[in-house]
Amino acid sequence: MTRVISAVPVGIIPEPLLRAQSTGGKLLLMVFAIILFAVVFGLVLAFASLFKGRNGEKVQGALFALPAVALLAVGLVYPALRTVNLSFRGRTADGPYSLDNYVTMFTSPELLVVLRNTAIWVVLVPFLATAVGLLYAILIDRARGEAFAKALIFLPMSISMVGAGIIWKFVYEYKQTSRPQTGLLNGVLKLFGLETRQWLLDAPLNTLMLIVVMVWIQAGFAMTVLSAAIKAIPDDIIEAARLDGVSGFRMFRYITLPSIRPAVVVVLTTIGIATMKIFDIVRTMTAGNFDTSVVAFEFYNQIFRFNAPGVGAALAVLLFVLVIPVVAYNVVQMRKEA
Amino acid sequence: MSTLEPTATPEDVTREMEETTEKKPRGGKRSRTGHAASSLSSPWASLTAVVIAVLWTLPTIGLLVTSFRGQRDIQRSGWWTFWQNPGGLTLDNYRQALAPGSSAGLSQYFVNTVVITLPAVVLPIFLASLAAYAFAWMPFPGRDALFVAVFALQIVPIQIALVPLLDIYVNKLGFGASYWSVWLSHTIFALPLATFLIHNFMRELPGELMEAARVDGAGHVTIFFRILLPLLTPALAAFGIFQFLWVWNDLLVSLVFLGGTPDVAPITVRVAELSGSRGSAWYLLSAGAFISMVVPVAVFLALQRFFVRGLLAGGLKG
């Protein structure tokens, strides 16, 4: 332990307050941290209240905002700029400036597969999750037991993607056709007399199987937001349409869907952004093997496994660049509707 | 609120049932039920809803049942056959997964998760509500530009900050693989969304409230603690639940800053590790997965109301 420490500059927090072995020690550390944060918080407030008068007001305001703004500047803006810088400095991020990492990203066969997979994810997940969520929201709207029916679809949102990955990995579990099946999906195949499959091994099928997990998680989000939007449609609009003889699918197409359009856009884009950053599911279920890697996973892989922080940085920058137009579209749409 | 009226009275239901048994659905006459969905409700609609609900719950039930089955049963037969041998259900898997010194040793990782999560929820709420108050009600030079900047930072994916941040923790601050790295990281990553959400709620409060307090001689500190925080409890709860679920369920941040270090790593990291290295040890994996899920599911079910409110206010971390 001491050997490692000596290689590192002396920390601002003494060693006993950095780590703890026993459960009690850990809990104490946690309480200490919360108290420390509260004390710092109190000091800022006490300091701020020293400033009185009209100009003092302004200083107070700046001081109230200071901790959050300073943390963001040091912990998010500066690191982001550094990552952009690193992405131009070759594979190991310490060489001369070049576009090598970006060239690698768009030419090497492995990374092209990664980009292709990410595209498949981003196209399929938002639309499938929104479609299922919307369908379910309409089907159970004002039905008996609506709250319970919602909770069933909603629950996957509260568990970790690691947990979700394990749940589905078990659904996809493979055994030879002749043996008793333990995976649900292969069990169903066998029931119908079909050969069992290695769902997570065969590309490109395996990417689709991973996408199912994300749809399973996100449908609850879509359902909740869209259900609230459906309930917000004024009754008189529906009544008027009904008097005109509109019903069934046409009611959905011409009344419901246009009324909830802003909510649908928000849901699609929000899920789209979450999908671009997908990491946990891929890592838990296939570890990116068998051609299932995606940008946010490959980013981690390049840095921590292949020792290519430059390529990793370039992938992180790509992720950022991909997110911007989606967010921009989202904001523009919301403006238009408002 | 019109939604408080019962929309499907027993009479309506029996009428619908009669209609279906007669096999003469007369769409036009349905208007009396007076809502959007009734036009779609039919046996097929109900069936579809049930199919979706079953598809969405069956995978979880499968692993839950498995977590209570013996190690050999899990290998030899599908979980759907468990009813043939209900006596075979056992808590052994959970015992083995939690036992200290066992190969999984999940109890200490569980403690780590708790220790990581609480400060990582409390701290951003502190900082963000303070900043949101300044942005909402305290004029100072450059305020609006700064608020737009904080708001805009929501789009920055955390991936882009991870490695330089790790460098700062290890080489500048000497944190290494310690709780402090994750506490600070989760706080930083939460601040843009938290500030934005809490700011929105604060703007909705009437300005007269603040002015009246000022006239009475109350300072900003008093107003913040005495007037604003109590009124904001629902908003803070909404954000708190988001942040709680996000931190408890996080994998990437912990993996980058803590690696697999048993002293500090959270349960998600350990369960993910088990899933990779011991792919077929389903007796451990199933129990481990549910040990990691029980707290967020309980919190979620208990506080669902706040969660939905936060969700509709635009708070989903993308």
Image (tube, helix red, strand yellow):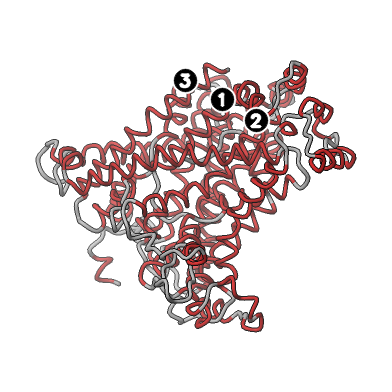
The x, y position of residue A26, in whole percent, is 50, 67
Q: Chain of mark 3?
A: A
Are the residues under marks 1 and 3 on the same chain? yes
Counting other residues with Cα less than 10 Å from the Cα at mark 2, is it few (<14), some (14-19), or many (20 or more)? some
The x, y position of residue B279, in whole percent, is 39, 70
Q: Disc 1 designates what residue? A: A262
The x, y position of residue A265, in whole percent, is 52, 28
Residue A332 is marked as: 3
Residue A229 is marked as: 2
* Label 1 residue SS: helix
Residue A325 against residue A3 in the figure, above or below: above
Counting other residues with Cα less than 10 Å from the Cα at mark 3, is it few (<14), some (14-19), or many (20 or more)? few
For badge 1, the amino acid type reads Pro
- Between the C-alphas of marks 2 and 3, the distance is 19 Å
Q: Chain of mark 2?
A: A
Q: Residue at x 24, y 66 (%)?
A: A6
Q: Residue at x 35, y 45 (%)?
A: B159
Are the residues under marks 1 and 2 on the same chain? yes
For badge 3, the amino acid type reads Val
For badge 2, the amino acid type reads Ala
- Between the C-alphas of marks 1 and 3, the distance is 11 Å
Furthest toward the left, the residue is A96
Are the residues under marks 2 and 3 on the same chain? yes
Callouts 1 and 2 close, C-beta under 8 Å:
yes
